[in-house]
Amino acid sequence: MTRTEDLHSLTGAYALHALPDDERNAFERHLADCGTCEQETLEFAAATARLGLAATLVPGPALKDRVLHRITSVRQVPPGGGTVEKARRVVPRGRGPARWALAACLAAAAGLGGTAAWQYERAQDAGQRATQAERRAETLAGVLAAPDAESRTARLAGGASGTLVVSEGQDRAVFLASGMAEPPRGKVYQLWFDDHGTMRSAGLMDPGSTSQAVLMEGAVDGAAGVGITVEPAGGSKQPTSDPIALLSMPA
């Protein structure tokens, strides 16, 4: 693969370390001279990192006590008495992947990433949180992978960037942030749909993460654009500050 237009399509695969050696080397040479691909690769890396955390569950404090208690009652398997099966990892490789489909694949994997935690912590509330996280990851992935997904990227303050991805068919939107400064202490970034002059809350961003992927709350419903404001922790019903960024909907 040597054509420039083909190399442009490899940003997602490169961010996921899914390229064979020859294509990776060719892409890295191309990356040194292509600012667009460099920015897109950074955005993919930010999105994949966020998606990987989407379904992570932290075992509750009672887990340690239960494990220590079970140690005293569970017999050890004698040498040679157990069977260990080696699982093979199959890493699919494709050429010319769809722009957002790779992020969807990772989101699906993230949805399964909490399985080990569920096996240790089976409390009902933990299971409900896991199910909600998995559904959000699947919905987010569906927007990114939608055939009609359109995107718009804008430079934000301090060298950060934001990408808005919208699926008209699913009537949902995702906001990808890369390199955003942390909000002031006690504050949070809040996303808004701009309903032609009326701002409608679309959820909060994680104040502790400078790069993240956020499934915006609610339907797009014909909104003209998206805004970001700095709000008190917990968010506001209406914006209380001037927007730090405004993005119109992708054409």
Image (tube, rainbow, N blue to C red):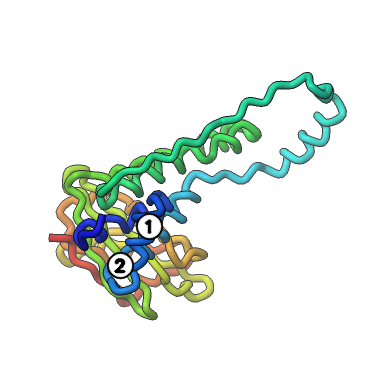
At x 38%, y 57%, the residue is 24
Q: Secondary structure at mark 1?
A: helix
At x 83%, y 22%, the residue is 78
Q: Quadrant of the C terminus?
A: bottom left
Task: Give the x, y percent position of residue 88.
Answer: 53, 32
Q: Is residue 60 left or right of residue 208?
A: right
Q: Is residue 215 left or right of residue 81?
A: left
Whether residue 228 is situated above or below residue 56 in the rendered picture: below
Whether residue 63 is situated above or below residue 197 in the rendered picture: above
Question: Relative to the observer, which residue lies in front, 78 or 200?
Answer: 78
Going by the numbered disc 1, the residue's amino acid type is Arg
Q: Which residue sits furthest bottom?
A: 158
Task: Give the x, y percent position of residue 63.
Answer: 72, 38
Q: Is residue 107 left or right of residue 130?
A: left
At x 48%, y 49%, the residue is 52
Whether residue 81 is situated above or below residue 99 in the rendered picture: above
At x 31%, y 43%, the residue is 94
Closer to the chain start, of discs 1 and 2, is: 1
Q: Is residue 100 left or right of residue 78?
A: left
Task: Give the x, y percent position of residue 229.
Answer: 35, 70
* Viewer can see residue 50: yes
Question: Relative to the observer, which residue lies in front, 121 or 71?
Answer: 71
* Viewer can see residue 136: no
Task: Check disc 1: other Cα within 10 Å, few if <14, some if 14-19, many if 20+.
Answer: some
* Residue 24 tag number: 1
Q: Which residue is mark 2?
A: 30
Going by the numbered disc 2, the residue's amino acid type is His
Q: Which residue sits furthest left?
A: 251
Kindly report the distance in space between the C-alpha atoms of the residues bearing marks 1 and 2: 10 Å
Q: Secondary structure at mark 2?
A: helix
